[in-house]
Amino acid sequence: MLWVYLLTITKLTCFTSSDINECLEKVCHVDATCVNTNGSFNCFCNDGFTGDGVISCQCQVSDPCQSAQCQNGGLCIAISGSCTDYNCTCTECYTGQFCETLMDPCGNNPCQNGGNCFAIPGSCIDYECICTGCYTGQFCETCKYHSIS
Ligand SMILES: [Ca+2]
């Protein structure tokens, strides 16, 4: 009798744990997250979206550029497929995620052969190379003595 009892318990356990994972069949909206539960499932709209999670998940904010943080004249471009993400397209003098950084014309060290770079005040792209030794030219790329001989 004990043997039959154990067999029955095992069968019951198997029966109750045979939940279907509905999440594998993409039952939720494309912008929702599926959570499988025993005997059912739940759909939750992703961050920035609102709705029932099955038929609808709509953007809570109609345009992410309304609250964009692009600075210094940067242009906001909303990223399609997202309610909250955007990119800033910066004007020529600024860089960074939010165009917050003023570009330095000497930033990538354009002067060669030990020349010192000086940014020209009031410009973000113009600079002057102050050359050392025999070197001359816009980037201190030429040695004066080579051209004489
Ligand atoms: Ca389920």
Image (cartoon, rainbow, N blue to C red):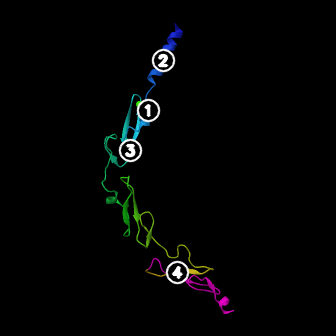
x and y, in percent, of residue 47 in the image: 37, 47
User: Is 149 placed left or right of 93 in the picture?
Assistant: right
**Amino acid under disc 1:** Asn
| Structural distance between the alpha carbons of marks 3 and 2 | 37 Å
Q: Is mark 3 within 8 Å of ligand 1?
A: no
Q: Residue furthest right?
A: 149
Q: Residue at x 37, y 36 (%)?
A: 42
Query: Which of pointers 2 and 4 lies earlier in the amino acid sequence?
Result: 2
For residue 118, the mark is: 4
Q: Is mark 1 within 8 Å of ligand 1?
A: yes
Q: Which residue is mark 1?
A: 21
User: Is 39 placed left or right of 139 in the picture?
Assistant: left
Query: Which of pointers 3 and 2 lies earlier in the amino acid sequence?
Result: 2
For residue 11, the mark is: 2
Residue 3, image quadrant: top right
x and y, in percent, of residue 44 in the image: 36, 41
**Amino acid under disc 4:** Phe
**Amino acid under disc 2:** Lys
| Structural distance between the alpha carbons of marks 3 and 1 | 17 Å
Q: Quadrant of ligand 1?
A: top left
Magenta-highlighted residues = 123-149
In the rendered image of this protein, does residue 14 appear above or below residue 143? above
| Structural distance between the alpha carbons of marks 4 and 3 | 53 Å
Q: Which residue is mark 3?
A: 30
Query: Which of pointers 1 and 2 lies earlier in the amino acid sequence?
Result: 2
